[in-house]
Image: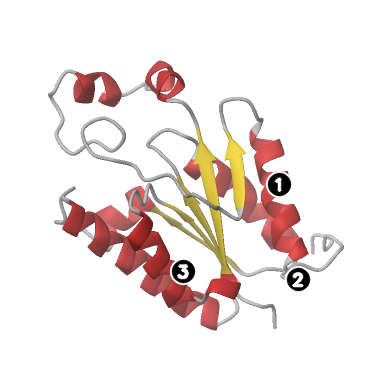
Amino acid sequence: MNQGFTVWLTGLSGAGKSTIAERLAPELAARGCSVEVLDGDEVRTHLSKGLGFSRDDRDINIARISFVASLLVKHGAAVITAAISPYTQARAEARGRIGSARFVEVFVRCSLDELVRRDVKGLYKKAMAGELQHFTGVSDPYEAPENPDVTVDSEIESVEESVGKILVEIKRRGFLPSEIKAAL
């Protein structure tokens, strides 16, 4: 059985967490991992419906994600989370719940200017105009990781480059076999 682990993608809205998760998942599967993706938007729809965006509600949401991830990790799954997870303390609690040795924190960095430029829904513009409350990075804080296990920069790196950096760290920790398994 494979060793379970979690790749915890954190970063501002629109930084590329979900895109990276979508590209990383098949790479892990091709290497024999049983993969589960816990996307922040999907979790809010199904597991955390009714929560708002206050600090307490955000912390509850991250606690729920990390609880599910910890259960999956115990059963050998490779879990990829893609959630803003803006607070250092909540991420530290997630690391503790999952287990530090099985937790790979990935900071998906992107400048606010680039995020505003990319924003097809206009959420940053609305937040900057005061029309959206509790918007992380504008009217609510985002506490960037001080010492993430991996930093990717979606503003200057391709998705493939970012995924490659994450795979190097996962392999370094001994979670992956060297070769890619052939498709059945």
Q: Residue at x 46, y 34 (%)?
A: 15
Q: Residue at x 76, y 67 (%)?
A: 176
Label 3 amino acid? Arg
* Secondary element type, mark 1: helix
Indicate left or right for 88 with 154 as reference. left
**Which of marks 1 and 3 precedes in the sequence?**
3
Label 2 amino acid? Gly
* Secondary element type, mark 3: helix
Please state the total of marks drawn on the protein image: 3
Report if residue 77 is visible in the image: no
Residue annotated with mark 2: 174
In space, the residues marked 1 and 2 are separated at their CA atoms by: 15 Å
Residue annotated with mark 3: 95
Q: Are marks 3 and 2 in contact (CB under 8 Å)?
A: no
The quarter holding residue 65 reads: bottom left
* Viewer-nearest residue: 111 or 175: 111
Residue annotated with mark 1: 165
Q: Residue at x 31, y 24 (%)?
A: 121
**Which of marks 2 and 3 precedes in the sequence?**
3
Where does the image place residue 148, in percent across and percent down from the top left? 55, 53
Where does the image place residue 112, in percent across and percent down from the top left? 40, 24
Q: Quadrant of the C terminus?
A: bottom right
Mark 1, Cα crowd under 10 Å, few <14 / some 14-19 / many 20+, is some
**Which of marks 2 and 1 precedes in the sequence?**
1
Mark 3, Cα crowd under 10 Å, few <14 / some 14-19 / many 20+, is many
Label 1 amino acid? Lys
In space, the residues marked 3 and 1 are separated at their CA atoms by: 20 Å
Indicate left or right for 35 with 178 as reference. left
| Mark 3 or 2, closer to the camera | 3
Where does the image place residue 76, in percent across and percent down from the top left? 60, 79
